[in-house]
Amino acid sequence: MSQRSSVAELAASLRGELDRYSPGEKLPSSRSLVERFRASPVTVSRALSVLSAEGLVVTRPGSGAFRAEAPGAPDPLAGVGDTSWQEIALSADPSADQVPRSVDATGVTATLDAPPPGVVELNGGYLPPGLQPERALSAALARAGRRPGAWGRPPMEGVTELRGWFAREIGGISGTVVPSEVLITAGGQSAITTALRALAPPGAAVLVESPTYPGMLAAARASGLRPVPVPVDTEGVRPGLLAEAFRASGARVFVCQPLFQNPTGAVLAPGRRREVLRVAREAGAFVIEDDFARHLAHEDAGRLPPPLRADDPEGVVVYICSLTKATSPSLRVGALAARGPVVERLRAIQVVDSFFVPRPLQEAALELVGAPAWPRHLRTVAAGLRARRDIMLAALASELPALSLAHAPRGGCHLWLRLPDGTDEAALASAALRAGVAVAPGRPYFAAESPAPHLRLAFAPAPESEIVEGVRRLRTACAEVLPGHCRDPRT
């Protein structure tokens, strides 16, 4: 069972016992709760924090935890007014001819929402606590806080030393990327939004891989852009179709993930790398390279291809990377790298949106990547992801051989499964949740109509011991929704 589930279960137990105490009465000590529930001190502390956030408990350092005073009963009608006018205000815009103003974030929240306690998480996008460098992060944050000027205002472009580290990571020892071409961002999602707003005006078309990351589609639509899909196969985007899409749409931006693409796991083939850049140059367009998974290569990945940005002297590529995926969801530190006048526009939009990334977070990131623990952590991640991938592949072959897998990736966190024609993805995902496993339906990964039903299974979020059980629970759901394709384990 994951720590998150343990915290939620302990909080539920304590919540159910609060009626034993009068408002203001002291609760049992943390030590007694540790002994009674056989939980770690960290789990007890986090469970009490949950109750404190709900307003049920008050914690006083050095004194303990107390039941909160009962608030006065609120008037259910107080402050309630007619908000129906907002439907018009949020929709009426004479300038938005064809671009809807509503923002659909369901594809993003499906992988961000924590599943209920006891549910195996096969739909997330982050490393589990066991693969996160928690000790190294804590030590880095402590050292960063003691750095001279750590709590002062940072340069708007980012801390100089951190920009230099990212420049070396992107351009390699050849120095094809210099620090002045790098902007520090608040993670990859923020960088995607900044790049899209900088490169395309509202109402414009933007080319995207099909399928692709739902968070990018949501960011594009929220910026008033029209995503136009370009199909990918096991070798990445197809350059001929990319050229055709540029001609048909008039787009000046193409967003891609050349390395371990989300969700297919494809790596852009060497010959196609050159063609993608050539096609974009001929169209007078930018390529936004989202290199989100470079630090998520598996142990058997071999030598990775360099970023497209490393071989782009003409400024076609706007490059995005982040430390978040390989560390912790809360270390939201990433980078944008570009060349030419576009750098100033990227900088201006980021400054207007968020001023700058907090300096303590930048200093902590710099401490982390400069510590001896960093390369050890990446090796641990590579081994852990390979092991989890292989466990899931074996479980699928044993339990669900009818589901088709076009490509077994050597990087990233997930598998992309083709479901039998006619499968109701939403019904399957709901049945899976009832069976005790959370999965991601494929429809949100397509900018237009989906050519076939799919399912994305993430092997990274769950502990190794839970992956097989999660697949077995998925088999139970398949037996309910696809009785002709999956054997019911109860028969």
Image (cartoon, rainbow, N blue to C red):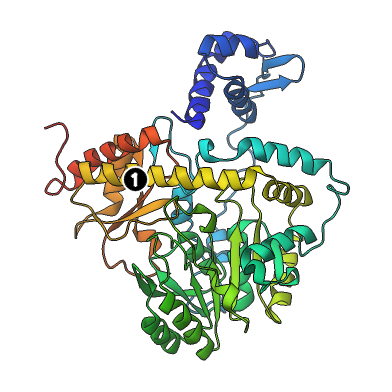
Q: Secondary structure at mark 1?
A: helix
Residue 259 place in picture, x, y as percent: 47, 64
Please identify the quadrant where the N terminus is shown: top left
Residue 339 visible? The answer is yes
Q: Is residue 302 left or right of residue 467?
A: right
Identify which residue, 5 or 101, lies in the foreground. 5
Task: Please tell me how many numbered marks the rendered image carries.
Answer: 1
Characterize the local packing of mark 1: few (<14), some (14-19) or many (20 or more) Cα atoms within 10 angstroms: few
At 66% from the left edge and 72% from the top edge, which residue is drawn? 174
Q: Which quadrant of the structure image shows residue 158?
A: bottom right
Query: Looking at the image, is 378 positioned above or below residue 157?
Result: above
Task: Indicate the position of residue 267 as horizontal and vertical percent values.
Answer: 42, 66
Is residue 297 positioned above or below 61 on the image?
below
The residue that mark 1 highlights is 390
| Quarter the C terminus occupies | top left
> Looking at the image, which residue is at 62% across and 84% down?
314
The answer to whether residue 337 is left or right of residue 444 is right
Amino acid under label 1? Asp
User: Measuring 68% from the left and 19% from the top, which residue is drawn there?
Assistant: 69
115 or 42, which lies in front? 42
Vertical relation: 76 (above or below) 151: above
Q: Residue furthest right?
A: 148
Horizontal and vertical percent position of residue 79: 64, 42
Q: Does residue 329 appear in the picture of this structure?
A: no
In the visual, does 85 lie left or right of 230? right
Q: Residue at x 18, y 51 (%)?
A: 402
Q: Position of residue 206 (x, y in %)?
A: 50, 77
Relative to the observer, which residue lies in front, 78 or 268? 268
